[in-house]
Image (spheres, grey):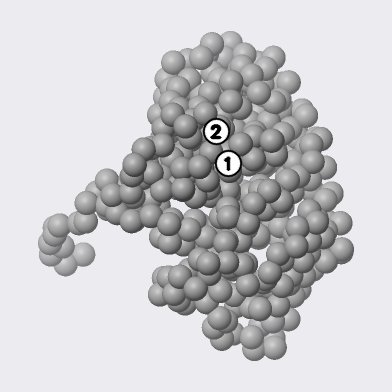
Amino acid sequence: MRNLIEKKKSRRAEDIRPFYVMDLLARAKQLESNGRSIIHLEVGEPDFATAQPIIDAGIKALQQLKTHYTPALGLPELREAIAGYYQQKFGVNLDARRVVVTPGASGALQLALSVLADPGDQVLLSDPGYPCNRNIAQVLGIESNNVAVGAESHYQLTAEHIQKCWNKNTRAAMVSSPSNPTGTLITQQQMQALINAVDEKGGHLIVDEIYQGLTYGVKDHTALSLSDNVFVINSFSKYFGMTGWRLGWMVIPDNYVDAVDRIAQNLFLAPATMSQHAALVAFDSKTEAILQSRVETFKQRRDYLLPALKTTGFKIPVEPQGAFYIYADCSALTDNSFEWTHDLLESEGVAVTPGIDFGDFEANTHVRFAYTRPIDELEEAIKRITKYIQ
Ligand SMILES: Cc1ncc(COP(=O)(O)O)c(C=O)c1O
């Protein structure tokens, strides 16, 4: 490198919090390259590859030279297909004009926050919660008010939190159901109460439904059955198994579509064309059959891991009913989950995510397990963790 001169970086660049698990992942990879066997329970993405019909549709789109930009809000036929999904799955009738196709749910979250809040405004988030929400807000100069949530509210924001924590600068509250990192859901009754509370404040509710479809023994819901005023975020990443295709969507109130279009044109130009053509078959019955069998596999993994972790010494006061995460209280084992996860990796080769990645509240006594690996690996992980604890 030639004479690298240290120049000033933006405050947002200096301030943004890292993903602590990335260091852990880097170390896990290093250990693996030295021949160690590592079990990855830290990764928040399905281990299954994208379903074949979707891959085939992507290849076909490329062969047909569909390589140009699409409109910023997405391919009209994909927006229609997404609107059709809500009709078919939830009986919700919505105008495809309200569907915005985005580069992942990540793109949708950036657009939603950009259109709803200005620098100096505030959003209410749960702690623990999905860390990027806080970080996207920070990059946009929006303050996050991270509300401590525990087992008593199933680690979710409630209408009471809205009443208590909303102030004159608050513009929006964000929730996710099923949640990352806790796998817990918000019932329709609680969602209605949240919608009413936020409406009363004249603010906005952003509902991240990215883990929709990945629920076990409970019915799937959408906040769109309850209100046309919510911002609902979703993605092809998780249930549809398309993480690397970078494609998501959001459904927004009609009167925000034009503003979101202008922001999307400037930030992204358009979502990836090949991915959008591939996603056109994501709702087909052939694809659906493959995806549903994966849901059954995730359920079996959860049903194995949940009691096994409890027997091993973790407390899991609320049964996770969705996503592919178990958020476990490890206070009986350590009061420093960050060191504990690093030590577990070094000693036994099991990688899990420390609570610090999801906020500050009781972060030192929690870890997140992702059951994105086959059951035989989960069994081996439990053996190794038991050995480590003993
Ligand atoms: C709650 C939640 N929202 C959004 C995302 C972003 O997903 P993507 O951009 O891949 O759609 C994730 C990814 O893990 C997530 O857990």
Vertical relation: 295 (above or below) 358 = below
Which class describes the residues within 10 Å of circle 2: few (<14), some (14-19), or many (20+)? some
| Picture quadrant of residue 290 | bottom right
In the rendered image, the quadrant that contains the N terminus is bottom left
Which class describes the residues within 10 Å of circle 1: few (<14), some (14-19), or many (20+)? some
Coordinates of residue 5 in the picture (x, y in percent): 12, 62
The first of marks 2 and 1 along the sequence is: 2
**Residue at the spot of label 2:** 159
**Residue at the spot of label 1:** 196
Coordinates of residue 349 in the picture (x, y in percent): 55, 31
The structure residue drawn at horizontal position 28% and vertical position 49%, both measured from the top left corner, is 120
Amino acid type of the residue that numbered disc 2 sits on in the rendered structure? Ala
Query: Viewed as shown, does residue 67 lie left or right of 77?
Result: left
Query: Viewed as shown, does residue 182 lie left or right of 202?
Result: right
Coordinates of residue 138 in the picture (x, y in percent): 34, 49
Amino acid type of the residue that numbered disc 1 sits on in the rendered structure? Asn
* Cβ atoms under marks 2 and 1 closer than 8 Å: yes
Query: Viewed as shown, does residue 28 lie left or right of 248?
Result: left
Nearer to us in this view, 289 or 361: 361
Nearer to us in this view, 135 or 91: 91
